[in-house]
Amino acid sequence: MSGLEQAPTSALPTGGQGAAGTPWPSGARRRTDGELEVAGVSVSGLAAEHGTPAYVLDEADFRARARAYRTAFEAAFAEVGAGVDVYYAGKALLTVAVARWATQEGLRVDTASGGELAVALRAGVPGTSIGLHGNNKSDAEVLAALDAGVGRLIVDSLVEIERVADLAASRGVTAPVMVRVTTGVHAGGHEYISTAHEDQKFGLAVAPGPDGGTSPALAALEAVVARPELELLGIHSHIGSQILDASGFEAAARVVLQLRADLAARTGVLVGEVDLGGGYGIAYLPGEVPLDPARIAKDVAGTVAEVSDELGTPLPRFSIEPGRAIVGPAGLTLYTVGTVKPVTVSESDADDGGTTFTRLYVSVDGGMSDNIRPALYGADYHAEIVGRESDAGPVLARVVGKHCESGDIVVHQVMLPGDVRAGDLLAVAATGAYGRSMASNYNALTRPPVLAVADGAARVLVRRETVEDLLALDQG
Ligand code: LLP
C-alpha cells in the first residue's frame, strides 16, 4: 500500500477495473510508486512524449460504456417487445477514431452540425447510421446530409420542414425526418420539472398553442405528412443533461406516446419511431453514483410498454442519444502544475463575525480554454497529483488555469497533498465529454491533443494545435 493511496486526496483505485465510487476511467490505477497508469500507460511517459495539457481517453472504457448502453437498452426493450437503436451523441466528443469505436460497438452516430457530419463520414460511418440535428441548419448542411443519405434529419421548426422538403425535391430524393418536440419536461440532476409551455429555442411544443388550438408539435407532424418529399419517421424528445434518475425520461415518453396516438387519430399515420434523446448522468466526483444503464433501461421500457398498452397502440421502435455517459468518464485531462500560491480567504459569518482560512491556488498550463464547464455551468471536478506519491497532509486547493480571467477555474475545490509544487502532473477526472468539444483558443492558447490509450500503448487521435496553426488562419 502506498502512502498516497491511503491519503484522502486520492480516489484512484490501485487495482481492479472500474471500482465503484471513482470518477476515473476503468483502466486508471495507481502504481505503488504513486504514478498513475491508464490502460497500462504511465502518465509521466505520456507527458514526456506528448506534453501537457493533454486529453487522455481510455479506449476500452469508452467501448465498454458504449456496449453497456447498447446491450442494456436492447435487453430491456426486447423484454417488452420493442427494438431500440443507440446513437452516440458526437457533440460530447467526436474524432474519426471515436466515431469508429462507437460504430464498431454497434452504435449509430448523432451529429449536430455539418462539421460533425463530416467527421462521422470521414470515419466511414454509413450515412444511414447517422442522424443530423440542429435548430438552424444551413441549406448546405441539409444538402450534405441528403447527399450522404443520412438515416434521419431531426427537424426543429415549421419553416425548416418546408425548407428540407424543397431541398429534397431539388435533389430528387425523399428526406427521412423526425420532428423534435418539447414535452414540457426538463430534467437534470435528481429532479424534473414539468411545465406546459416552453421558452427555449429547441423543438415544437406538444402543449396547445396560446388560443388553445392545435399544438405546434402536432401541426409540424401534419406538415411533414403533407409533403411527399418527406418521410415521417417519428418523434424526437430530448429533456436535458446529466440526469440521474428515470422519472424525467418516463414523463417525456408518456407525452410523446400520447402525441403519437393523437397524430394517428387525426391523420391515420402511426409513426414507427420515437427517440428519447440523451442526458444520462455520470459521476464527476468520488462517491457520486452514476446512472446505471440497466436500471434506467428497464424503468423506461416498463413505462413505454405500460403507456402503449393504455393507449392501445403498438410499440414504436425507440432510440436514445447518450453522449456524456459514453465518453465522459473515459477521459481525463493531464496538466503540469506551475505557480502555487497560498491565498488567505476571509468569510464573514453573522454569528461569530467571520473566519479566515488558506486556499492554495494551484495554477496549471491550461484552463477555461480546454474545459469551459466550471466557468460556464459551475461544474465540479475532481483532481489529483498523479506523477508521484506524497505523504504530505491534504490542503484545501483550487485548481486554476493560465488565462487572463479570474473565473478561469478548473476545479473549484479539492484536497491536494500539501507539498504540491511546480512540475507536478495533475489529472482532472471525467473530462471526456464537452471538454475538447467545447474548447477554444482564448488568449491564443492552442488546443491540447487527444491521446487514446489501450493495452499499454498510446496513440494521437487529434494532434496538439500549434501557434503556427493559429497564425495560418490569420490573413494579416
Ligand atoms: N441529443 C440531443 C438532441 C442533445 O441536445 C444532447 C445534448 C444529447 C443528445 C446528448 O446529451 P448527453 O447524453 O451528452 O447529456 N455542453 C453541456 C451539455 C449540453 C448538451 C446539449 N445537448 C455540458 O457540457 O454539460
Image: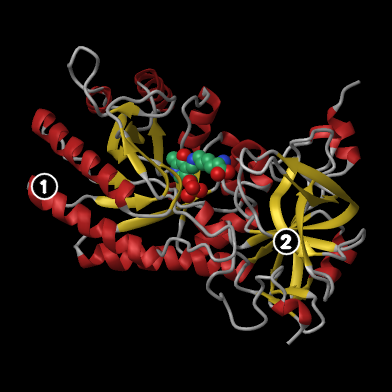
- Which labelled disc corresponds to residue 313? 1
Q: Tell me the residue at 43%/48% (across/down).
A: 278
In the rendered image, the residue lying farthest to the bottom is 1
Pick the quarter of the image with the N terminus: bottom right
What residue appears at the point 84 percent right and 63 percent down from the top-left corner?
A: 425
Residue 240 or residue 87, whichever sits in front: 240
Dot 1: within a 10 Å radius of its alpha carbon, few (fewer than 14), some, or many (20 or more) residues? some
Which amino acid type corresponds to the residue marked 2 in the rendered image? Answer: Met
Q: Mark 2 or mark 1: which comes first in sequence?
A: 1
Spot occupied by residue 63 in the image (x, y as percentages of width and height): 54, 67
Gap between marks 2 and 1, in whole Å?
54 Å
Q: Which residue is mark 2?
A: 415
The local secondary structure at tag 1 comes to loop
Is the residue 392 above or below the residue 14 in the image? above
Callout 2: helix, strand or loop?
Answer: strand
The structure's colour scheme is secondary structure
Q: Position of residue 83 (x, y in %)?
A: 27, 59
Number of the label disc, if any, that sits on residue 293: none
Of 218 and 105, nearer the camera is: 218
Residue 222, image x and y in percent? 22, 25
Quarter that holds the C terminus: top right
**Residue 44 versus residue 107 in the image, above or below:** below
